[in-house]
Amino acid sequence: MKTAELTGNSASSTAAPQEAAGLRSELLEALAGKQADRDRAVADKTRRVVLTSLGVLKDQEKGRRHARSLALAILLLAFLALGPFLWHVAEDLIGGEHLGDVATQFSLMACILCPAVLAAVLVVGWPRGKR
C-alpha cells in the first residue's frame, strides 16, 4: 500500500512542476507582449462596439430634441390661435357679463372644448415611435 501511495504522490509531484512551468511561460509571453495581437483584436472589437453604441445614443438624443421642439412649436401655435379667443372670454367676464348669457356660456364652452379637442388630436396623431 505504501508503494501505491508513493507512486501516486510521485506522479502528481511531477505534474505540478510541468503545470507551473506552463503557467510561467504564459505569464512571460503576456509580459513580453507576444499576445499583443489577441489583445489588439479585442480592443478593436470593443472600440467598434462602443462607437456604434455612441452613434445610437446620439441618434436617440437627436430624435428626443426633435420631438421636444415639435411639441413646443405646437404648444406655441395653439396658444397663439386660442389667445384672442381667451382674451375675448376674459374681457366678457371682467366687463360684467353674466354667466347666464348665451354668448358668455357659448364662449366658456368653446374655451373648454377647443383645448380638449386639440389635446385629443395631439394624442391620436402623436407618433408611436419609429417604425
Image (cartoon, grey):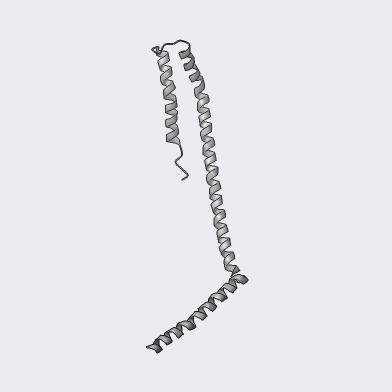
Say which of 18 and 35 sits in front.
Answer: 18
**Residue appearing at x 51%, y 30% in the figure:** 75
Quadrant in which residue 122 is drawn: top left
Q: Is residue 102 above or below residue 115?
A: above
Q: How many marks?
A: 0
Q: Where is residue 107 in the image (x, y as percent from the top left)?
A: 43, 17
Residue 48: image location, x then y, percent: 56, 57
Most extreme residue toward the left is: 1
Nearer to me, 128 or 33: 33
Residue drawn 49% across the image and 80% down it: 16
Query: Looking at the picture, does residue 71 appear above or below residue 80?
Result: below
Identify which residue is drawn at 39% across, 88% down.
2
Report the residue that reaches farthest toward the top: 96
Question: Percent from the top left, x then y, of residue 71?
Answer: 51, 34
Residue 12, given in percent of the width and then of the height, sits at: 45, 82
Q: In which quarter of the image is the N terminus?
A: bottom left
Q: Residue at x 52, y 28 (%)?
A: 77
Quadrant of res 33: bottom right
Q: Residue furthest front?
A: 2
Identity of the residue furthest to the bottom in this view: 3
- Residue 47, compared with residue 89, is above or below; it is below
The vertical placement of 8 against 116, above or below, is below
Nearer to me, 30 or 106: 30
